[in-house]
Image (tube, coloured by chain):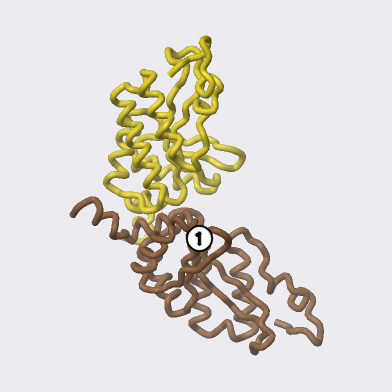
Chain colours: A brown, B yellow
Amino acid sequence: MGADNQQERLDTKWISGFVDGEGCFHVGINKMPKMTLRWQVLPELRIVQHKKNIPVLKKIQKIFGYGTIRRNHGDRFELRVRKIENLNKIVKFFDKNPLQTTKRNDFEIFKEIISLINQKQHLTNKGLRKIAELSSKMNRKIKSKYQESSETICPTSKGMKI
Amino acid sequence: MGADNQQERLDTKWISGFVDGEGCFHVGINKMPKMTLRWQVLPELRIVQHKKNIPVLKKIQKIFGYGTIRRNHGDRFELRVRKIENLNKIVKFFDKNPLQTTKRNDFEIFKEIISLINQKQHLTNKGLRKIAELSSKMNRKIKSKYQESSETICPTSKGMKI
């Protein structure tokens, strides 16, 4: 196989190394007044790159077989995976191609949250609280909007108690 | 092999993906009054990580079989490869495990410079000029100290003409 062809094919281990550097496992918990519990759990994997590297995002998307490429901010674009059925595949992918940095900790928490979502626990108050607690341990430990909300910090009789 | 053992061994393709995200091929051209041409060419590969990821840098160092781990700045540490004999091995490594992002362009220029150094061309004025020109095309295209120097921009009868 020529050098050019070799470059065409992405190795799954290469993707694991690249995501260790550039990927972000994130679980947002966003206010959604129309939803039953008023909070939406939004897990996602994001890989953000300068627009000049869109071809690499496309190659990763092709290997995964799913994910959306869209503008992130300014010159930056992202490959984003959000659908739960695809996130289940992401979990399998990184179980098979393990991350090596401390991002592995984020992934392990992410995996636990995905498992809770599979069990529909994000639709219960108890499950939502558990997910918020787990997600607060991810990334830079910034408190989620959910945890910072006066609704959840200082629940009143009118507010949602969870 | 258990999951733990799998995590112990770094795949070379994982390293390629990680360096595509986190590595930096750099060629410094620094003023060195004591050297014959007064300029020292300093090619290096650097992988900078937060100190919490020093174990990963050590794993890469182990696979490479060379490189130095040292503090970069504050909480950040780097694995650095500088010796020419090791940089020749680095070139072979990334020829075999190709980078996929635009960092590949940097690597190709880096490779050309390493080849010029192997031919001792960095010890000639012509070679030094060629290396400076090549290195200016790397990374963010910041002009090297060498190119910005009034000695080289505005050579006088007292200055070095190259």
Residue at 48 percent of width and 15 percent of height: B160
Vertical arrangement, residue B58 with respect to residue A86, above or below? above
Vertical arrangement, residue B10 with respect to residue B87, above or below? below
Q: Quadrant of residue A62?
A: bottom left
| Horizontal and vertical percent position of residue A26 | 55, 67
The residue nearer to you, when weighing B44 against B149, is B149
The residue nearer to you, when weighing B102 against A27, is B102
* Image position of B118 (left or right of B32): left
Q: Quadrant of residue B106?
A: top left
Q: Which residue is mark 1?
A: A48
Q: From the image, which quarter does the C terminus of chain B lie in?
A: top left
Asked if residue A147 shows in the view, the reply is: yes
| Horizontal and vertical percent position of residue B89 | 30, 36
* Subunit that carries the residue with mark 1: A
| Horizontal and vertical percent position of residue B122 | 37, 22
* Image position of A20 (left or right of A6): right
Q: How many marks?
A: 1
Residue at 52 percent of width and 24 percent of height: B153
Q: From the image, which quarter does the N terminus of chain B lie in?
A: bottom left
At mark 1, the secondary structure is strand
| Horizontal and vertical percent position of residue A24 | 52, 62
Q: Residue furthest left?
A: A1
The residue nearer to you, when weighing A134 against B29, is B29
Residue at 69 percent of width and 71 percent of height: A145
* Image position of A61 (left or right of A80): left
Asked if residue B8 shows in the view, the reply is: no
Q: Amino acid at mark 1?
A: Val
Crowding at mark 1 (Cα within 10 Å: few <14, some 14-19, many 20+) = many
Vertical arrangement, residue B136 with respect to residue A123, above or below? above
